[in-house]
Amino acid sequence: MPRPLRNYPTGTCLHLTQRGDNGATVFHDDEERHGFLDLLKEHSVKSSCDIHAYVLMTNHFHLLVSIREQNSQASLMKSLAQRTALWRHVRHGGSGTMWDKRYHSSLIDSSAYLLICQRYIELNPVRAGMVDFPGGYKWSSYRANAEGMNDELLSPHDVYLGLGLNDEERRHAYRKLFDIPLAEKDLERIRFATRGDAALRKPVNQCQTRRV
């Protein structure tokens, strides 16, 4: 059965993920991770996408993104696929893409789910047994969102900004969210929505973005 056509309007908030071809490793070392984040920063600006959260795992990555132009996530993901293929060819040989088919996307049509999804992304290394707490993993947005580390790649979402009146209040409130494990039903809902390019929604206003 063909996948549904993805047609996202301006202002849409998305959970994006993509895996290596046949589950292969895509980030072999820190140089490649740094290179990917540099490409993500460059092409998120060119593609009119705001990055709210990310994590780089060994064979895949997750992004929480808001688009400022219709379907601009497609341009972002296409650029990342093309540019990363170049370093695969140079460093590891071979030809073709390093990614498995097309990327997966899930529309976050609920402010209630936005922070749940953001935590889901930043908790990936913990669920994978790579670290004991999200701040122990270098290649995610947690240390910026929760601890205040400078990360020019990120643009905080309005829902995150609403956690407090200033940066210290927001970071404290955000860290407290991690004291409560994600419910299994939320984990399954996020996984199901992402695999099926479906929406995570509740009857609340569609999420919006702003830059700070």
Image: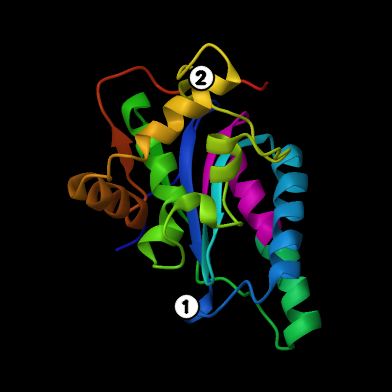
Q: How many marks?
A: 2
Apparent side of residue 78 relative to residue 158 in the rendered image (left or right): right
Please check the rendered image and state whether residue 179 is part of the magenta-colored stretch, yes or no: no
Residue range corresponding to the magenta coloring? 63-80
Please check the rendered image and state whether residue 67 is part of the magenta-colored stretch, yes or no: yes
Q: Which mark is residue 169?
A: 2
Q: Which mark is residue 209?
A: none
Cα–Cα gap, marks 1 and 2:
40 Å
Apparent side of residue 184 relative to residue 34 in the rendered image (left or right): left
* Residue in view at x 58 percent, y 28 percent: 156
Residue 209 visible within the image:
no
The amino acid beneath tag 1 is Gly
The amino acid beneath tag 2 is Glu
Q: Secondary structure at mark 1?
A: helix
* Residue in view at x 46 percent, y 22 percent: 159
Q: Where is residue 36 shown, x and y percent of the image?
A: 70, 60
Q: Which residue is mark 1?
A: 23
Q: Where is residue 88 shown, x and y percent of the image?
A: 72, 78
Give the camera-side residue of 48 and 128: 128
Residue 111 lies, with reference to residue 19, above or below; the image says above
